[in-house]
Amino acid sequence: MHGYNGKDLARAFRTVRANTIKIAEEIPEDKYGYRVAEGTRSVAETLAHLATGTGWAVEMHGQRLPAVEFGLFMAAMQRAGAAAAALTTKAQLLDALRTEGDKFAAFLESFPDEALAERVKYPEGMQPPDKSRFEMLLSAKEHEMHHRGQLMVVERLLGIVPHLTREMQARMQQAQSQRA
């Protein structure tokens, strides 16, 4: 299929999760209730969503189910929602991000390479009608990056320069110093 395998997925996910954890550490706990707008998730709700959201992929692909069934998906989302609701402190959220991230990365690392090419059918009417397990597992990382981008905007609104921006600024400053 391609040269990208479960170990690569795990490595990439670990990088993304480490950056999410860094943001979670930098936002003060008294700002965890902050919402950008009415109807959006708070900082804490977003972090809890990320911490609990990978269980669905492990359940789906660990069993190598051939099709996404709406009932299974909804049951997994309800379990994730209940687990997320139990995460009420910054310490609990950070622990869950680390623990669940490690579990998911270990799952990806051990996932059989040949299974990544398997096609999984989606419910009737969904487009596309199927996806590879590779694409579905990669989407967990993409999902986290989407929400991490939201959290980086929240950091800016709270007056925090995100760590990735600070690191890039430091590299640019160092490069300019070396040229001078």
Image (cartoon, rainbow, N blue to C red):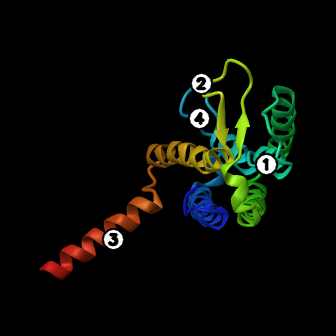
| Residue type marked 2 | Glu
Mark 4 or mark 3: name the one nearer the start of the chain.
4
Comparing marks 4 and 3, which lies closer to the viewer?
3
Give the crowd class for mark 1: few <14, some 14-19, many >=20 residues within 10 Å.
Answer: many
Pointers 4 and 3 in contact (C-beta within 8 Å) = no
Q: Which residue is mark 3?
A: 170
The structure residue drawn at horizontal position 75% and vertical position 61%, both measured from the top left corner, is 111
Give the crowd class for mark 3: few <14, some 14-19, many >=20 residues within 10 Å.
Answer: few
Q: Which residue is mark 2?
A: 38
Label 3 – label 1 distance at C-alpha: 41 Å
Pointers 2 and 1 in contact (C-beta within 8 Å) = no
Mark 2 or mark 3: name the one nearer the start of the chain.
2
Corner quadrant of residue 104: bottom right
Q: Which residue is mark 1?
A: 61
- From the top left corner, tell me how far across and down residue 72 is, in percent: 86, 33
User: Element at badge 2?
Assistant: loop
Comparing marks 2 and 1, which lies closer to the viewer?
1
User: Element at badge 1?
Assistant: helix
Q: Is residue 38 above or below residue 179?
A: above
- From the top left corner, tell me how far across and down residue 170 is, in percent: 33, 71
User: Is 166 left, or right, of 45 in this rendering?
Assistant: left
Q: Which residue is mark 4?
A: 35
Corner quadrant of residue 96: bottom right
Is residue 105 visible in the rendered image? The answer is: yes
